[in-house]
């Protein structure tokens, strides 16, 4: 599977690895909070990874809505993780380490809402191809399909605004 991993999944793996490293270090993350906040950070970073791989396995054509819902769930986990990190920082448990790491994740860009839109590339009577204006990933649609609300590759919100 490794060769086919989407960039976002590779990044999610790195994120989980870093989350575990930082929250396991008792100098940075004291025992007092390890089992409440530390565990949540670890588990949520795993949830991001497993939800993304789950979404990636759902058939694009036959279960489009389920796939969109699953991607949305992954983004929700990112929201949660950002909150746990923010709380940790407020409690002065973690400083900028995790925030810097998480800022560089494409997964988390989605939380900060990168906006894009689907650009039509090609079409015929029964199918069409659109391209993400942010990452340029192409998506194949059957004509009656509704376009994704989020780009499955980079997580951009496809509401037609902004940086694409
Ligand atoms: Zn994209």
Image (cartoon, helix red, strand yellow):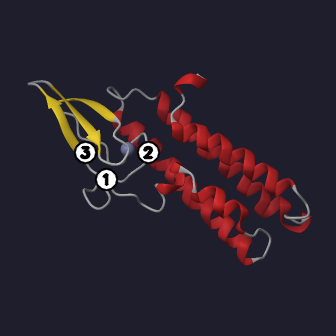
**Circle number at residue 118:** 3
Relative to residue 24, is residue 17 drawn left or right? left
Observer-nearest of 52 and 156: 156
Residue at the image position 8 percent from the left and 24 percent from the top = 125
Q: Residue at x 42, y 44 (%)?
A: 69
Residue 45 drawn at (x, y percent):
66, 49
Check whether the beta carbons of the residues at disc 2 and disc 1 lie within 8 A of each other: yes
How far is disc 3 from disc 1 in space, using C-alphas? 7 Å
Is the CB of the residue bearing disc 2 within 8 angstroms of ligand 1? yes
Instruction: Identify the residue at image location x=79%, y=59%.
Output: 38
Mark with earlier residue (2, 1):
1
Q: Please, is residue 135 above or below residue 87 in the view?
A: above
132, 45: nearer the viewer: 132
**Mark 3 crowdedness (10 Å alpha carbons): few <14, some 14-19, many ≥20:** many
* CA–CA distance in space, label 2 to label 3: 13 Å
Q: Secondary structure at mark 2?
A: loop
In the image, is the residue at mark 1 within 8 Å of ligand 1 by its beta carbon?
yes
Marks 2 and 1 sit apart, C-alpha to C-alpha, by 10 Å
Q: Which mark is residue 154?
A: 2
Location of residue 95 by image quarter: bottom right
Which disc number belongs to residue 116? 1
Left or right relative to 5: residue 31: right
Q: Position of residue 47 (x, y in %)?
A: 63, 45
Quadrant where the N terminus is found in the figure = top right
SS for callout 1:
loop
């Amino acid at each position: 599977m490794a060769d086919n991993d989407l960039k976002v999944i590779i990044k999610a793996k790195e994120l989980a690895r870093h989350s575990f490293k930082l929250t396991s270090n008792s100098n940075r993350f004291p025992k007092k909070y390890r089992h409440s906040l530390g565990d949540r950070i670890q588990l949520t970073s795993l949830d991001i990874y497993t939800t993304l791989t789950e979404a990636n396995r759902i058939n694009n054509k036959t279960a489009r809505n389920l796939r969109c819902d699953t991607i949305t769930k992954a983004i929700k986990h990112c929201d949660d993780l950002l909150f746990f990190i923010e709380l940790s920082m407020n409690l002065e448990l973690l400083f900028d380490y995790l925030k810097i790491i998480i800022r560089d994740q494409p997964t988390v860009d989605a939380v900060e809402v990168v906006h894009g839109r689907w650009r039509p590339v090609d079409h015929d009577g029964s199918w069409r191809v659109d391209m993400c204006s942010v990452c340029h990933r192409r998506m194949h649609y059957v004509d009656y399909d509704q376009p994704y609300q989020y780009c499955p590759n980079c997580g951009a919100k496809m509401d037609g605004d902004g940086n694409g």
